[in-house]
Image: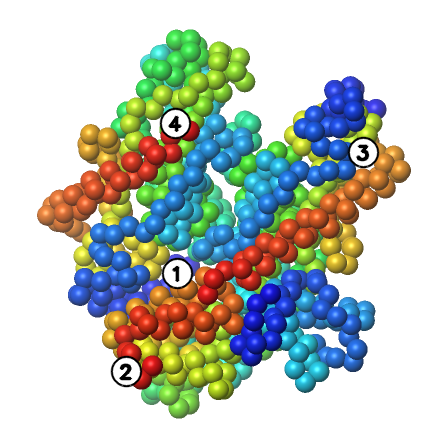
Amino acid sequence: MAAPVPSLLRQELERLAESDQRIDGRGRWDRREVQLEVDILYNAEGSAKVTWGDTVVYAGVKFELRTPWPDRPTQGSLMCGAELRPVAHRKYEPGPPSPQSIELGRVVDRGIRESGCIDMEALCIVPGEKVWGVMIDIHVLSDGGNIFDACGLAAIAALRTAVVPAERFDVGEDHVLAVKGTPVMASFQRVGGRFVYDPSEDEETGGEERIHITLGNEEHLHSLQKGLKGAFTPAEFAEILEVARTHCGELRELVSSMEGN
Amino acid sequence: MMGGYGDVKLLNDDGTRLDGRTVDEMRPVEIKAGILPAAQGSAWVKHGLNVAVVAVYGPMEAHPRKIQRQDRAVLDVRYNMAPFSTSDRIRPGFNRRSREISKVTAEALESVVLLERYPRSKIRVEIEILAAEAGTRCVGITAASVALADAGIPMRDMVVGIASGKIQDTVVLDLDKAEDNYGQADLPMGICPNTGELVFLQMDGDLSIEEYNLATEYNYKAAAEIHEIMVAALKERYDGGEA
Amino acid sequence: MSQGQNGAELRLVTPGSAIGPTSGRRVGTGALIQGDEIIATRVGHVRERHGTVSVDPVASCYMPRSGDLVIGTVIEARSNLWFLDINGPFQALLPMSLAPWKVEFGGTRDHADINDSLLMRVQEVDEVQNVVATMKGIGLRRLAEGAVLDIDVQHNDALRAEGAGLLKRLRDLSDCRLVLADNGRLWADGDAAGIDWLRSLLRAVAAAGRSDRFEAILDAHAANAPNQGDA
């Protein structure tokens, strides 16, 4: 059964919106505090933990040797998946992957893949025979709202600190995975009639449609997703895109600050 | 000696182990309580290089209805290894191993939780292994106990998970990965630190009765140490913070 | 070791830890007798009063008892009854006959619709936790405005304790009308500033967990309260 959306919560979100306030005291375009830790898990070749407000997410990178697709004999592969397991919230039930978790994984996957930050050719070991498959798994442990941005950040941070375990597979020396950019996601939700950045759990419960934007280093768009019921105007999108540019830039710097140690 | 496993060198000439531990020394253990904001109760345990995180939800209505018990609650325990927790990636989803561990873990915890307080309901215990370095089922049990306590679920005791085993014909406490892979026996136990009772027991390999007794003695000694760390974590959560 | 409100030292215990010999004492909540020993069953602070030893838990979930004042959210409306989420393990049932309105069969949603919040009393809890609620009683009603805030149930005793007057201070400082229900919910109605202040206070209380900290946290937040008039 879907969680209830108390009418009083909706009423209050509307009332707050009228005076341009938010339920947790933030401004409309403010972000909650974000903490990033990298290289924290023993068996993952790259790992990251993101604590974003009440949301906690881990990402881990693994590598495998595989034969390339026949039509792309010199290219490796990338796969990114997310799991919304029942650990993350009372509302998640055990069972096969839900449509929400598949959407989450695919939106993060597209942002990373389409930014071209992973050079697929560089993952080739023997053309037509042996290439690296890079697998990013994202594990949501606590859903306190806006898991999309937390998952996107954890995934790219884990990738950017990953080491290719070539020695273990007997194909040369271990080396840092080459990652050329830092695609970062910014998510917005319509709450009380207008869009806000980084929705909290209450805002997601009482909100309407959401929009996810992934921007690369050159501020090019790499993935967009509109989710849930609702309609928005081009002018609204233009406004949130400007906000996304600022926040993606700040978060990109946070990821960079983790590297090289 | 089984299958020549005892032939792999796991002990140094001075009797210490490859990582420098003595035979009755456990790996370092760190515990934190209340680390997942969305959960009712939660715990994080790092034991050696193992990392387990547990969330507890409930009591809530037990469904499907066929799992309901009219006279008590049921524990709905899920032990799950994250895809990146092992050397080779694990495909997501349940497998036979995690199903068995979930079952015996639930039964261990059901032995201490005061289930009769909550007829027809279920309490969800979600064990997530984020990094595995031998002994994850024990780390999961320890973490689950702390998370249940953090959630305010009444229990007559907590449960500490700990294992001893045998390497190179020598009984040692708390096998690490190499010792687990090439050792001769593994004896994981779930020990109630206050009553001294056992609520979880498995074993595989080859142990003499004398070796079993020594391994058990090591496990009890370690359980007392781990219990102190569990209690300290709960005190840190509830007695430490600033107003 | 921390100090309680009355200055006595509070002893934090964990499940299974021995509190002391029975010596003729009874046990209350959060403790049980094992052999000759009193054992804690929860994380909490030991309290002894009139020969009864109990543990005030630092974390707790709501278990309905008859007579409780509760705030419920309507989950389902049938022709002659409602089902409500009351923050417990099971939903509560409110039959048409115990509603304060003249309800026509099939017309339940005209009076209380899905997602509405109702202030009710628990009429009855049977041995398998079926909960029947009633709205016959003074002040019981549909909550049409204001906000329902979460507050862990272990704080209720501290808030209601005579003498301390914490609930009155909350009322004065927030300048809100308040109803503290027994099921971990606090209804507040007033200006947005008052409700915001209450929400941030309760977030700090939830992070600390302990009920004996409530007053200290309130003191720390009092300076930011919207109404400083009679504080």
Q: Which residue is mark 3?
A: B171
Vertical placement of C75 versus A232: above or below? below
Q: Nearer the viewer, mark 1 or mark 2?
A: 2
Q: Which residue is mark 4?
A: A260
Q: Nearer the viewer, mark 4 or mark 3?
A: 4
- Describe residue C26's horizontal placement relative to residue B35 as left or right: right
In x, y percent, where is residue A155? 38, 35
Rendering quarter of residue A253: top left
Q: Secondary structure at mark 2?
A: loop
3D distance between C-alphas at marks 2 and 3? 72 Å
Using a 10 Å C-alpha cutoff, classify the residue at mark 4 as few (fewer than 14 neighbours), some (14 to 19) or many (20 or more): few
Q: Nearer the viewer, mark 3 or mark 1?
A: 3
Q: As shown in the figure, which amino acid type bears the numbered disc 2?
A: Gly
Rendered-image quadrant of the C terminus of chain C: bottom left
Q: Chain of mark 3?
A: B
Labelled disc at residue A3:
1
3D distance between C-alphas at marks 4 and 3? 43 Å
Q: Nearer the viewer, mark 2 or mark 3?
A: 2
Callout 2 and callout 4 share a chain: no
Q: Residue at x 33, y 72 (%)?
A: C223
3D distance between C-alphas at marks 1 and 2? 40 Å
Circle nearer the N terminus (4, 1): 1
Rendered-image quadrant of the N terminus of chain C: bottom right
In x, y percent, where is residue B203? 76, 38
In x, y percent, where is residue B79? 58, 45
Furthest residue toward bottom: C138
Labelled disc at residue C229:
2
Q: Chain of mark 4?
A: A
Vertical placement of C130 versus A152: above or below? below
Q: Secondary structure at mark 1?
A: loop
